[in-house]
Amino acid sequence: MANWASTAYVIEGPENTLNKIWEAIQNPSTCVEDSSKGWEGNILLSLGITWEERHVAKEKTDGTETVLYCKGHYLRGFIDEDYYKDAKGFLHLFAEEAWGLTDFAELLSSKFPDIKVYWTVQEDGAEIYCTNDKGGKYFPERVYVDVCYNGDYYSEHFPDEDSAFKWLSEITENKICTEEDAEKFNEDRIGSDDYIAVHYYDIED
């Protein structure tokens, strides 16, 4: 059973290129047999992005066959239906991707060098928190905090460590104000449901 990562993309570029991608997402002209319409591979294949050796691997999921990846490229991901265009015509996509970021953005960029693909990915099970949006243009989150405090659950994203610990101090009545406070809290609450997990985003090129 896969851990599904939540990935978001923003694609900037010329209108004609973005329209091609938009059409392929809405109505992929190529759909591999037994695959979901929203599978990232179908979108790429519809845009003429092919692989020298394309062998589809499948697994049984609730009695159905699901496309996982093509040989040489990891594409175990599906674009959600809540994608949209913003006022500038840029594309905003949301995906569920197994275990972390797939090769979707890399292959898309290789086909269309005139686009820029920004992405952010979060997979809590493997503690993957990562983005390529260095300047925070679309994805300013740099810290993710997940908390169970006195049996109550909280989680929030923050642009920096200071704002994360300011929030933590507020929900803990000034008991947790630093990373050292959080570490001590976790040590003291071993064996209970309470915890404080502070995750920092990796920034990739």
Image: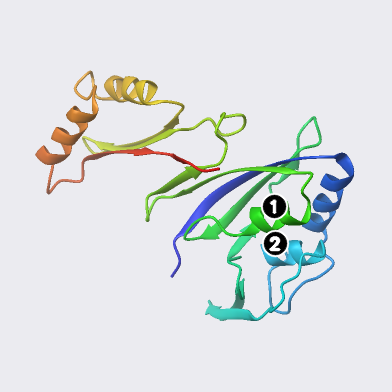
Disc 2 to disc 1: CB gap under 8 Å = yes
Residue farthest right in this picture? 16
Residue farthest left in this picture? 188
Q: Give the label, 2 or 1, closer to the camera.
A: 2
Q: Position of residue 80 (x, y in %)?
A: 65, 53
Q: Residue at x 49, y 56 (%)?
A: 100
The crowding category of the residue bearing disc 2, from other C-alpha atoms within 10 Å (few below 14, some 14 to 19, many at least 20), is many
> Amino acid under label 1?
Glu
Q: Residue at x 71, y 51 (%)?
A: 109
Q: Is residue 77 left or right of residue 53?
A: left
Quarter of the rendering occupied by the N terminus: bottom left
Front residue (pair 79, 56): 56
1 versus 5 height, above or below: below
Q: Position of residue 146 (x, y in %)?
A: 34, 39
Q: Which residue corresponds to mark 1?
A: 81
The crowding category of the residue bearing disc 1, from other C-alpha atoms within 10 Å (few below 14, some 14 to 19, many at least 20), is few
Q: Which residue corresponds to mark 2?
A: 38
Q: Residue at x 48, y 44 (%)?
A: 130
